[in-house]
Amino acid sequence: MSSPPPDAGTVAAVTVRPWPLFIDIAALSLPISVSDATYRINKNLRYFSGNYALIILSILLISLIVRPILLVLFLIIFVGWIYLYFSRNEPLELFGFDVDDKFVLGFLTLVTLVALLVAKIWMNIFVSIGFGIVIMCVHSSLRAPEDQEDSPYGALLSESPRGNYSIV
């Protein structure tokens, strides 16, 4: 009826990094400047995107815990997203026909929006996602990337709060 799910050894497009690496307190430090903070956010959002997505999803599901029926409904929808869209390396096959990824994306988006409209939990969703984005930005700006010495701002980022402008 449908194509089989990918093998367990197949690499997904979004990689969840090891949690001890994500939570490493030794890697936390204050950024030197606003440009350093934006550089850190950019690097960490790319590197830890799977971890941040799981954190936001967890916050969203925890916020739905007071409504167990909606929690189950959205868990089923999220499993559908993971199975039908994110974990596929080949087109979905249904009744012998290949289903385009754009159609799958549109269908899953429509199902999600209809569920949100029927459940009337827009404010809960927005507050949960907003809270998750704040946590994500704070963590990504405080965590120094592994390749800090390769910053595009190079020597402009110095340890002095006033900066080292002699090299400019």
Image (cartoon, rainbow, N blue to C red):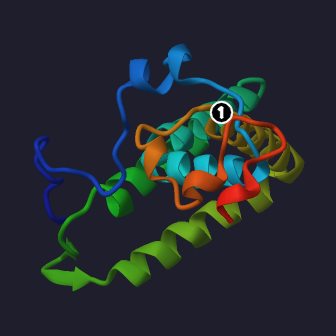
Is 110 drawn above or below residue 9 in the view shown? Answer: below
The quadrant of the rendering that contains the N terminus is bottom left
**What's the residue at 70%, 46% (across, down)?**
37
Decide which of 109, 23 is in the foreground and name it.
23
Front residue (pair 150, 81): 150
Can you give x and y, in whole percent of width and height, for residue 142 in the image?
66, 32
The reply, left or right, for residue 123 in relation to residue 165 is: right
Q: Give the residue at the far right of this rendering.
A: 123
- Which image quarter holds the C terminus? bottom right
Q: Residue at x 75, y 36 (%)?
A: 160
Question: Residue 25 lies in what quarter of the image?
Answer: top right
Q: Is residue 139 left or right of residue 127?
A: left
Residue 46 percent across, percent down from the top left: 48, 53
Q: Position of residue 34 (x, y in %)?
A: 78, 50
Residue highlighted by disc 1: 139
Q: Residue 63 is drawn in which quadrant? A: top right
Secondary structure beneath dot 1 equals: helix
Give me the residue at 66% from left, 42% from top.
158
Extreme front residue here?
Answer: 166
**Number of marks drawn:** 1
Could you tell me residue 58's position as x and y percent?
Answer: 60, 31
Q: Amino acid at mark 1?
A: His
Local crowd size for mark 1, using a 10 Å CA cut-off: few (<14), some (14–19), many (≥20): some
Picture residue at 10% right of the left edge, 47% below the top: 7
Residue 38 is left or right of residue 117, and the answer is: left
Which one is in front, 140 or 145? Answer: 145
